[in-house]
Image (cartoon, grey):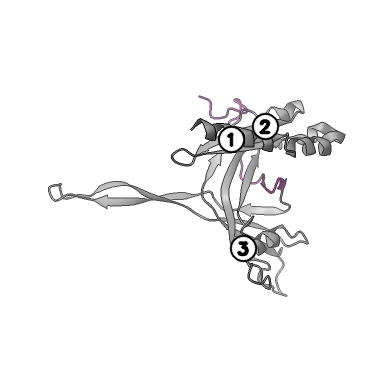
């Protein structure tokens, strides 16, 4: 199998400097650094009395490391708004927005031509650390950086071939299911490339987002699947 399915003639690995991050259905402006997607699985050591003088090893619990997003300080409030959903001073008894303090985010990687080549969806993220301003120094010359640290519950690599709609000018739907345990499956559906509809983009977005659109379809699918059990 070729190393690159998007462009079989490509030889060089992808670079790490062209990427974007999306949540709430749109890309977030100005993000300049994303820490690594990393997970570790604990090693459980065990031995029986009659075993040789060595340990048996097996996998234990898996932990997903937090992700840090950095960007230059601007007037865009996206970082602050999300952090305030976890804790908002002066909000009274309801300091945490239980409805939407967790978000799924998408990390998209692009090649040198600006084509989308890799995409990872990160699940149930929430802000555990927010830096509004960095250290300020009158004798320094640097961009002021803010950051958020995201706790999360894992990621999946989104798999679709070539992302052809970007070359043909059309929109497409990414549909993905994930096993969440006995008798439970998580289904994610994302309709991308709606800008291909041009002046009709807003109307099509409204149609697809209505009860007769994708949300209604998934609701009927869930009801049917639940009834089948």
- The structure residue drawn at horizontal position 61% and vertical position 39%, both measured from the top left corner, is 119
- Structural distance between the alpha carbons of marks 1 and 3: 32 Å
Q: Is residue 210 above or below residue 1?
A: below
Tell me the magenta residue range: 1-26
Q: For mark 2, what is the residue? A: 173
Name the residue that disc number 1 marks: 223
Residue 75: x and y, percent? Answer: 78, 62
Q: Residue 138, image x and y in percent?
A: 73, 75
Residue where numbered disc 3 is placed? 86
The mark that comes first in sequence, 1 or 3, is 3
The quarter of the picture where residue 110 lies is: top right
Is the residue under label 3 in contact with that under label 1 (CB below 8 Å)? no
In magenta segment, residue 11 = yes
Residue at 53% across / 56% down in the picture? 66
What residue is drawn where x is 43% and y is 39%?
A: 182
User: Which quadrant holds residue 176?
Assistant: top right
Instruction: Estimate how packed mark 3 is, as few (under 14), some (14 to 19) or many (20 or more) residues with alpha carbons within 10 Å.
Output: some
């Amino acid at each position: 199998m070729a190393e690159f399915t998007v462009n079989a003639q490509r030889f060089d690995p992808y670079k790490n400097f062209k990427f974007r991050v999306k949540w709430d259905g749109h890309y977030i402006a100005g993000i300049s650094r994303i820490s690594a997607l990393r997970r570790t699985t604990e090693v459980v050591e065990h031995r029986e009395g009659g075993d040789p003088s060595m340990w048996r090893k097996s996998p234990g619990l898996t932990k997903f490391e937090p992700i840090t997003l950095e960007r230059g300080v601007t007037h865009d409030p996206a970082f602050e708004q999300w952090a305030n959903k976890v804790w908002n001073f002066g909000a009274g008894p309801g300091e945490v927005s239980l409805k939407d303090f967790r978000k799924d985010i998408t990390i998209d990687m692009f090649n040198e031509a600006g084509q989308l080549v890799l995409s990872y969806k990160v699940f149930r993220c929430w802000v555990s650390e927010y830096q509004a301003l960095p250290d300020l120094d009158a004798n320094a010359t640097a961009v002021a950086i803010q950051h958020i640290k995201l706790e999360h519950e894992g990621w999946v690599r989104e798999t679709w071939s070539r992302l052809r709609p970007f070359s043909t000018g059309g929109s497409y739907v990414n549909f993905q299911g994930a096993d969440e345990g006995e008798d439970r499956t998580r289904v994610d559906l994302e309709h991308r490339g709606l800008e291909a509809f041009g002046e009709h983009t807003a109307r099509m977005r409204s149609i697809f987002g209505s009860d007769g659109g994708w949300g209604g379809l998934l609701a009927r699918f869930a009801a049917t699947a639940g009834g089948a059990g």
